[in-house]
Amino acid sequence: MICFICTACGSQFGERQEPPQTCPICEDERQFVPETGQQWTDMRSIGRTHEIIWKNEAEGIHSLEISPSFAIGQRAFFINGPAGNILWDCLSLVNEQSVARIKAAGGLAAIVISHPHFYASMVEWSTVFDGVPIYVHADDGEWVQRSDPALHSWKGDTMPLGQASIVRCGGHFAGSSVLHCPWLEGGRGALFVGDTMQITLDRKYVSFMRSYPNLIPLNARTVEGIVEAVRPYPFEAIYGAFAGRTIKKDGMRAVVQSMGRYMRAIES
């Protein structure tokens, strides 16, 4: 029995003898099936050809990426927290070096996932840390491909996690969420956004999409809802899903200005 991993989106499926015929996440309009067709791998195979690269992003924040890039190529974040360490979003690969490094830093108190594209091997990560809880919004529960007792389906618009807050913004997915950590950035706060907001290449703005690869925008009301959801939470920095996609200062100002720019573009 193998837990197959989709090579296009990186999601790990439950144990089975043969790979699935399709990946529901890739069949959805927010992702895509590559021109070469649906292909599958597994954790052991990825581990033979790939590694996990750690980068110190700021005090208390490390990013983790699979190298060479695999599937969507997102980065996860290991966040040192006063109530326990948090893994924000996930990777398809779990390796011994990263597990040892996290255990040496105090282990994990929680795994928090922004949306289905970054579910990756979240159950595998939880398992190696003794079943640490995985928080996934209930509105995205239909996209979970590997069930486990560690999965906690939370509901509503916000959920406290120690001093952190998980905030449901919607938009990209119904349950798309961000993580607010007020103790970071010298107490000025940091926001981890997954794909709920995509930091632009100039690192001055964010943008919003239902589908990034297929270029399907969101409507004005939905974008306003995303911004209003994060407005109560002060933050200096915004950490996006991909390497280099970080806004280092005036994060809330960047979000508000980005909303204005987006509205002008879709209404003109």
Image (cartoon, rainbow, N blue to C red):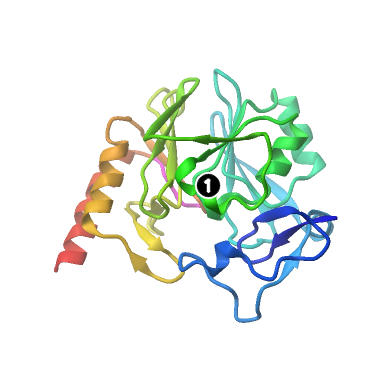
Q: Is residue 158 magenta?
A: no
Magenta stretch prevailing secondary structure: loop
Name the residue tied to disc 1: 141
Residue nearest the viewer, comparing 220 with 240: 220
Q: Quadrant of the C terminus?
A: bottom left
Residue in the picture at 38% in, 57% down = 200
* Three-letter amino acid code of the residue under disc 1: Gly
Asked whether residue 233 is in view, the answer is yes
Which one is nearer the viewer's eye here, 14 or 101? 14
Is 99 in front, or is 200? 99
Report the magenta residues as a range: 244-248
Q: Quadrant of the N terminus?
A: bottom right
Query: Left of 266 or right of it: where is 23?
Result: right
Residue under the point 78% across and 45% down: 95
Residue 159: name its quadrant: top left
Residue 76 rendering spot, x and y as whole percentages: 59, 45
Of all residues shown, which one is farthest toward the left?
A: 268
How many numbered discs, if any? 1
Q: Is residue 185 left or right of residue 45?
A: left
Badge 1 density bin: few <14, some 14–19, many ≥20, Cα 10 Å: some
Image quadrant where residue 18 sits? bottom right
- Residue 10, quarter of picture: bottom right
Report if residue 239 is visible in the image. no
Name the element at disc 1: helix
Q: Position of residue 266 (x, y in %)?
A: 20, 65
User: Which residue is situated farthest in the bottom direction here?
Assistant: 35
